[in-house]
């Protein structure tokens, strides 16, 4: 989400969009920064360059699925560890009830 204004071509760098949480974290007053929750995991040191980097179509599709399902985004090993830590394992299972196995013929 912090990349949305950049992707829409509204700014040259994501942190320049004054109405975003990224702007508040980077440039906001102490009061504005205080409105934001802490991340549930450690923020990557290279977050700002990553947000401003171009995305591949594959990465964008993975991000959309992540948002739709409420699952962690990252490499598979990190996703698994983080999902377990935050009790989000269900976000990786198919939605709905498991399908019934067909009855066997006698």
Image: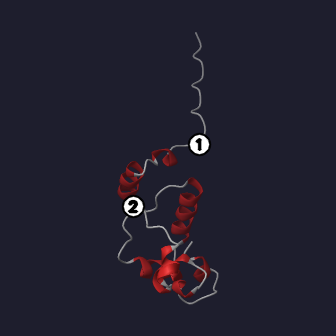
Classify mark 2: helix, strand or loop. loop
Q: Nearer the viewer, residue 28 or 45?
A: 28
Q: Nearer the viewer, residue 106 or 39?
A: 39
Where, quadrant-wise, is the N terminus in this rendering?
bottom right
Depicted 61 relative to depicted 10: above or below: above
Colouring mode (rainbow / by chain / secondary structure / one colour): secondary structure
Where, quadrant-wise, is the C terminus in this rendering?
top right
Q: Residue at x 42, y 51 (%)?
A: 86
Question: From where the camera sits, is residue 89 visible?
Answer: yes
Q: Which residue is mark 2?
A: 75
At which x and y percent is residue 25? 47, 79
Seen from this angle, which residue lies furthest top? 106
Q: Residue at x 59, y 31 (%)?
A: 99
Q: Return the disc, 1 or 2, that comes first in the chain's sequence.
A: 2
At which x and y percent is residue 23? 52, 83
Badge number at residue 95: 1
């Amino acid at each position: 989400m912090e990349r949305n204004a950049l992707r829409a071509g509204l700014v040259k760098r994501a942190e320049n969009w004054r109405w975003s949480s990224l702007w508040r974290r980077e440039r906001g007053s102490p009061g504005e920064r205080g409105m934001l929750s802490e991340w549930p995991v450690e923020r990557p040191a290279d977050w700002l360059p990553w947000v401003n980097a171009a995305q591949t179509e594959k990465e964008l599709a993975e991000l959309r699925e992540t948002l739709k399902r409420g699952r962690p985004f990252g490499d598979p090993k990190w996703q698994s560890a983080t999902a377990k830590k935050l009790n989000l394992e269900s976000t990786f299972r198919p939605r709905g009830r498991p399908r019934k196995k067909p009855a066997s013929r006698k």
